[in-house]
């Protein structure tokens, strides 16, 4: 599932690419045809992201004027030539030259301003958003008996944080993913939040996740660059059995919250 930086990057690209253009909005697949017709031949007022949720706000000429997308595990939103018809395209937004084509989302809905506010209200604080307030999240974390590795995957707490950022932030700070939330100090929470803000905002800019510090890059360590479908240089994610860059201990993994958790048992005691 794409992590929050991907959705924020898509929101920025939608705004940048389509600007003030009057857009063709259709559903070649047909499953979103009636909704697409309502916002067809209008403009995007803004595209915005909250965690892993994308909201495309069209000119308010109808009560339902916001397309609400969650990509889920297999969904994609790609910018392609307007004539591209490959695959089952749920939503097609085009200025006649370039199209944003949505395939296989968990959902694609047409909603009102009120419904958007309700959806956002169910989410936690998003480290990428400048208006995020982490203090209420800290209190919830420090009252919980759940592990910090579990809490970081809770979208009602940390909106947009996924499996990679969970593993990498905890490693970078030397915090065990099994440490209960109620044992996380104020200083540790502040460090976790600050690290997520920095890493995730960098991910929006770069379009990929890089978490290793300068001294652990392939160039600095004289090692081959990482080869993985997810791209980016990381410390623990999908490196099971490989030596830790700091201590040479093999990286371990186990399932937590339905996803494989990766950590170094020596650096994260």
Image (cartoon, grey):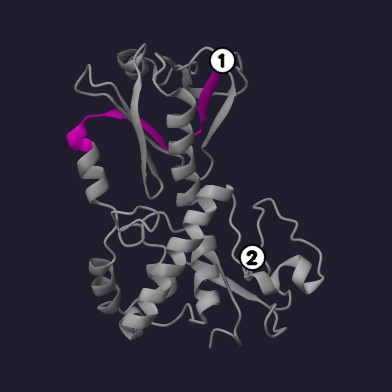
Rendering quarter of residue 260: bottom right
Above or below for 218 versus 84 = below
Which residue is painted at 33% across and 54% down in the image? Answer: 130
Counting from the top left corner in percent of width and height, residue 83 is at: 60, 13
Above or below for 88 versus 155 = above
| Sequence-first tag of 2 and 1 | 1
Rendering quarter of residue 84: top right
What is the magenta segment's predominant secondary structure?
A: strand
Which residue is painted at 36% across and 75% down in the image? Answer: 190
Counting from the top left corner in percent of width and height, residue 149 is at: 44, 72
Magenta-colored span? 98-115
Disc 1 crowd, CA 10 A, few/some/many (<14, 14-19, 20+): few
- Mark 2 and mark 1: Cα distance apart in space: 37 Å
Verify CB contact (< 8 Å) between mark 2 and mark 1: no
Say which of 119 and 31 sits in front: 119
Horizontal side of residue 7 vs 156, given as left or right: right
Above or below for 161 versus 24 = below
Q: Is residue 101 magenta?
A: yes
Q: Secondary structure at mark 2?
A: loop
Q: Secondary structure at mark 1?
A: loop
Is residue 55 visible in the rendered structure shown here?
A: no
Is residue 39 visible in the rendered structure shown here?
A: yes
Residue placed under numbered mark 1 in the picture? 97
Above or below for 2 versus 217 = above
Say which of 177 and 257 sits in front: 177
Which residue is painted at 34% across and 79% down in the image? Answer: 181
Horizontal side of residue 239 vs 148, given as left or right: right
Residue placed under numbered mark 2 in the picture? 234
């Amino acid at each position: 599932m794409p992590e929050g930086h991907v959705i924020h990057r898509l929101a920025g690209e939608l705004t940048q690419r389509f600007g003030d253009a009057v857009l063709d909005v259709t559903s070649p697949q047909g499953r979103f045809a009636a909704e697409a017709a309502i916002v067809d031949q209008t403009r995007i007022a803004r595209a915005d992201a909250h965690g892993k949720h994308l909201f495309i706000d069209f000119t308010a000429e109808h009560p339902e004027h916001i397309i609400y997308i969650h990509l889920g595990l297999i969904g994609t939103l790609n910018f392609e030539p307007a004539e591209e018809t490959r695959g089952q395209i749920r939503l097609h937004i085009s200025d006649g030259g370039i199209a944003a084509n949505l395939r296989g989302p968990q959902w694609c809905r047409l909603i009102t301003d009120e419904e958007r506010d309700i959806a956002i209200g169910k989410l936690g604080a998003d480290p990428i958003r400048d208006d995020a307030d982490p203090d209420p999240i800290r209190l919830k974390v420090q009252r919980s008996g759940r592990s910090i590795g579990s809490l970081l995957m809770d979208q009602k707490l940390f909106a947009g944080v996924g499996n990679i950022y969970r593993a990498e932030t905890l490693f970078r700070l030397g915090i065990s993913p099994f440490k209960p939330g109620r044992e996380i100090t104020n200083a540790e929470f502040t460090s976790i939040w600050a690290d997520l803000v920095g890493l995730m905002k960098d991910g929006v800019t770069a379009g990929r996740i890089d978490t290793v510090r300068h001294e652990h890059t392939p160039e600095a360590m004289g090692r081959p660059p990482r080869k993985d479908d997810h791209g980016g240089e990381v410390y623990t994610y999908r490196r099971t059995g490989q030596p830790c860059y700091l201590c040479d201990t093999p990286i371990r993994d186990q399932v937590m919250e339905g996803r494989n958790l990766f950590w170094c048992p020596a650096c994260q005691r």
